[in-house]
């Protein structure tokens, strides 16, 4: 396993563990999701270079597009929940009370 594989595997694992265990604020969950998307983007960008593909694939650009859409939607949800509930604590966001 090369150093680049180890780095994005560990980045993805640490961000998914952060998402699973550190769920106090919505902004921290969004940052963990963004770091997961960034590690997946780096992995998809390095993959054609390591396989000596003749043409780069379109997949990293699609991943970057979906990541930007996810970030915009997450920030819109953060602003909406802060306006309605007064904070971004995840324990205040109960879907059964809506």
Image: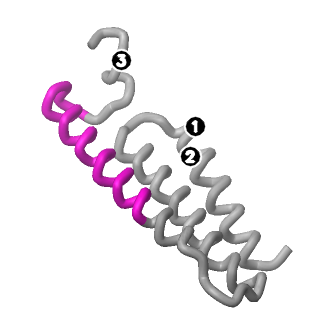
Secondary structure type for disc 2:
helix
Task: Give percent across and percent down for residue 45.
Answer: 60, 77
What is the C-alpha distance between the residues marked 3 and 2?
21 Å
Asked if residue 80 is positioned above or below residue 33 in the image, the reply reads: above
- Which colour style is shown? one colour
Q: What residue span does the magenta drawing correspond to?
A: 65-87
Which residue was labeled with disc 1? 21
x%, y% of residue 89?
Answer: 33, 32
Relative side of 89 to 82, left or right: right
- At label 1, counting other C-alpha atoms closer than 10 Å, the crowd grade (few under 14, some 14-19, many 20 or more) is few
Which of pointers 3 and 1 lies earlier in the amino acid sequence? 1
Q: Quadrant for residue 47, please give it.
A: bottom right
Q: Is residue 29 magenta?
A: no
Label 1 residue SS = helix
Quarter of the image that includes the C terminus: top left
The quarter of the image holding the N terminus is bottom right
Foreground disc of the pair 3, 1: 3
Decide which of tag 3 and tag 2 comes sooner along the chain: 2
**Along the line of sight, the residue nearer the viewer: 62 or 91:** 62
Is the Cβ of the residue at disc 1 closer than 8 Å to that at disc 2? yes
Q: Residue furthest left?
A: 83
Q: Which residue is mark 3?
A: 94
Name the residue rendered at 42%, 58% in the picture.
67
Q: Which residue is mark 2?
A: 18
CA neighbours of label 2 inside 10 A, class few (<14), some (14 to 19), many (20+) = some
- Whole-Å distance between the Cαs marked 3 and 1? 18 Å
Image location of residue 7, percent across then percent down: 69, 71
Task: Using the numbered discs, state the Cα–Cα distance from disc 1 to disc 2 in whole angstroms.
Answer: 5 Å
Question: Residue at the location (42% across, 35% down)?
Answer: 24
Answer left or right for 31 relative to 97.
right
The reply to whether the magenta stretch includes residue 70 is yes
């Amino acid at each position: 396993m090369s150093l680049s594989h180890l780095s994005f595997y560990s980045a993805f694992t640490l961000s998914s563990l952060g998402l699973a265990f550190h769920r106090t604020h919505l902004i921290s969950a969004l940052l963990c999701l963004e770091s997961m998307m960034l590690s997946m983007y780096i992995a998809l960008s390095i993959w054609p270079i390591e396989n000596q593909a003749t043409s780069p694939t379109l997949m990293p650009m699609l991943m970057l597009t979906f990541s930007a859409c996810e970030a915009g939607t997450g920030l819109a949800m953060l602003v909406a929940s802060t306006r309605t509930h007064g904070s971004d604590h995840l324990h205040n966001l109960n879907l059964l009370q809506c």
